[in-house]
Image (tube, rainbow, N blue to C red):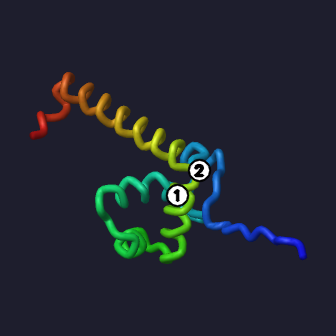
Amino acid sequence: MSTTVLSIDTIVSNPDVRGGRPTIDGRAITVSDLVARYLRGVSPEDLASNFDLAFGQVHAALAYYYMHKQAIDDDLRRDLETANRLKTELEQRGKLGKLD
Protein backbone atom coordinates (compact mmCIF):
# COMPACT_ATOMS: atom_id res chain seq x y z
CA MET A 1 0.00 0.00 0.00
CA SER A 2 1.46 3.38 -0.97
CA THR A 3 1.36 6.47 1.14
CA THR A 4 -0.11 9.69 -0.18
CA VAL A 5 1.28 12.89 1.28
CA LEU A 6 -1.46 15.48 1.64
CA SER A 7 -0.40 19.08 1.65
CA ILE A 8 -2.21 22.03 3.11
CA ASP A 9 -2.30 24.77 0.49
CA THR A 10 -2.99 27.52 2.99
CA ILE A 11 0.55 28.89 3.27
CA VAL A 12 2.04 30.30 0.07
CA SER A 13 5.03 32.32 -1.05
CA ASN A 14 4.89 34.78 -3.93
CA PRO A 15 7.84 37.06 -4.68
CA ASP A 16 5.37 39.86 -5.54
CA VAL A 17 3.60 39.67 -2.15
CA ARG A 18 5.40 40.80 1.01
CA GLY A 19 8.79 40.11 -0.53
CA GLY A 20 8.11 36.42 -0.93
CA ARG A 21 7.66 35.79 2.78
CA PRO A 22 5.22 32.98 3.63
CA THR A 23 1.66 34.34 3.73
CA ILE A 24 -1.87 33.07 4.15
CA ASP A 25 -3.13 32.22 0.65
CA GLY A 26 -5.07 35.13 -0.82
CA ARG A 27 -4.05 37.50 1.95
CA ALA A 28 -1.09 39.78 2.61
CA ILE A 29 -0.78 38.62 6.22
CA THR A 30 2.51 36.80 6.78
CA VAL A 31 3.15 33.83 8.99
CA SER A 32 5.57 36.00 10.96
CA ASP A 33 2.86 38.68 11.45
CA LEU A 34 0.65 36.10 13.13
CA VAL A 35 3.47 34.43 15.05
CA ALA A 36 4.71 37.74 16.48
CA ARG A 37 1.31 38.34 18.01
CA TYR A 38 0.91 34.72 19.09
CA LEU A 39 4.25 34.85 20.92
CA ARG A 40 3.04 38.00 22.73
CA GLY A 41 0.08 36.01 24.05
CA VAL A 42 -2.69 36.53 21.48
CA SER A 43 -4.73 33.34 21.27
CA PRO A 44 -5.36 31.51 17.98
CA GLU A 45 -9.06 32.34 18.38
CA ASP A 46 -8.30 36.05 18.70
CA LEU A 47 -5.88 35.94 15.76
CA ALA A 48 -8.61 34.40 13.60
CA SER A 49 -11.11 37.02 14.73
CA ASN A 50 -8.73 40.00 14.51
CA PHE A 51 -7.53 39.15 10.99
CA ASP A 52 -10.79 37.67 9.69
CA LEU A 53 -9.15 34.29 9.13
CA ALA A 54 -10.51 30.79 9.41
CA PHE A 55 -9.32 28.97 12.50
CA GLY A 56 -7.59 26.43 10.24
CA GLN A 57 -5.63 29.20 8.52
CA VAL A 58 -4.24 30.35 11.86
CA HIS A 59 -3.29 26.83 12.84
CA ALA A 60 -1.70 26.23 9.42
CA ALA A 61 0.43 29.35 9.99
CA LEU A 62 1.43 28.16 13.45
CA ALA A 63 2.22 24.67 12.12
CA TYR A 64 4.33 26.24 9.36
CA TYR A 65 6.14 28.29 12.01
CA TYR A 66 7.03 25.25 14.10
CA MET A 67 8.20 23.40 10.98
CA HIS A 68 10.35 26.40 9.91
CA LYS A 69 11.02 27.94 13.31
CA GLN A 70 14.60 29.12 12.75
CA ALA A 71 13.78 30.95 9.50
CA ILE A 72 10.69 32.66 10.95
CA ASP A 73 12.53 33.56 14.17
CA ASP A 74 15.28 35.09 12.02
CA ASP A 75 12.63 37.14 10.15
CA LEU A 76 11.14 38.33 13.43
CA ARG A 77 14.58 39.28 14.73
CA ARG A 78 15.40 41.24 11.54
CA ASP A 79 12.03 43.03 11.71
CA LEU A 80 12.68 44.06 15.32
CA GLU A 81 16.20 45.27 14.49
CA THR A 82 14.84 47.31 11.55
CA ALA A 83 12.07 48.82 13.69
CA ASN A 84 14.53 49.76 16.42
CA ARG A 85 16.96 51.30 13.91
CA LEU A 86 14.19 53.35 12.26
CA LYS A 87 12.88 54.49 15.64
CA THR A 88 16.36 55.64 16.67
CA GLU A 89 16.84 57.51 13.37
CA LEU A 90 13.49 59.28 13.76
CA GLU A 91 14.29 60.23 17.35
CA GLN A 92 17.68 61.62 16.29
CA ARG A 93 16.02 63.74 13.60
CA GLY A 94 13.48 65.05 16.10
CA LYS A 95 10.64 63.40 14.17
CA LEU A 96 9.63 61.16 17.04
CA GLY A 97 9.41 62.01 20.71
CA LYS A 98 11.15 59.72 23.16
CA LEU A 99 8.86 56.87 24.16
CA ASP A 100 8.92 55.65 27.75
Q: Are marks 1 and 2 in contact (CB under 8 Å)?
A: yes
* On-image quarter of the N terminus: bottom right
Circle 2 sits in a helix, a strand or a loop, which is it?
Answer: loop
* Residue lying at 46% horizontally and 52% vertically, measured from the top left: 32
Q: Residue 51, how many percent across, how many down?
A: 41, 68
Q: What number of labels is visible?
A: 2
Residue found farthest to the right: 1
Q: Nearer the viewer, residue 46 or 19?
A: 46
Q: Using the image, determine if residue 86 lies above or below residue 47.
A: above
* Residue lying at 49% horizontally and 62% vertically, measured from the top left: 62
Mark 1 crowdedness (10 Å alpha carbons): few <14, some 14-19, many ≥20: few
Residue found farthest to the left: 100
Separation (CA) of disc 1 from disc 2:
7 Å
Q: Which mark is residue 28?
A: 1
Mark 2 crowdedness (10 Å alpha carbons): few <14, some 14-19, many ≥20: some
Q: Residue 91, how many percent across, how many down?
A: 19, 28
Who comes first in sequence, dot 1 or dot 2? 2
Q: Residue 92, how many percent across, how many down?
A: 19, 22
Q: Residue 53, how many percent across, how many down?
A: 48, 73
Q: Is residue 15 left or right of residue 69?
A: right
Q: Using the image, determine if residue 90 lies above or below residue 69.
A: above
Q: Which residue is mark 2?
A: 17
Q: Using the image, determine if residue 60 lies above or below residue 77.
A: below
Quarter of the image for residue 98 reads top left
**Kind of residue sitting beneath label 1:** Ala
Residue found farthest to the top: 92
Q: Nearer the viewer, residue 71 or 15?
A: 71
Q: Nearer the viewer, residue 7 or 53?
A: 7
Quarter of the image for residue 42 reads bottom left
Q: Is residue 98 left or right of residue 13?
A: left
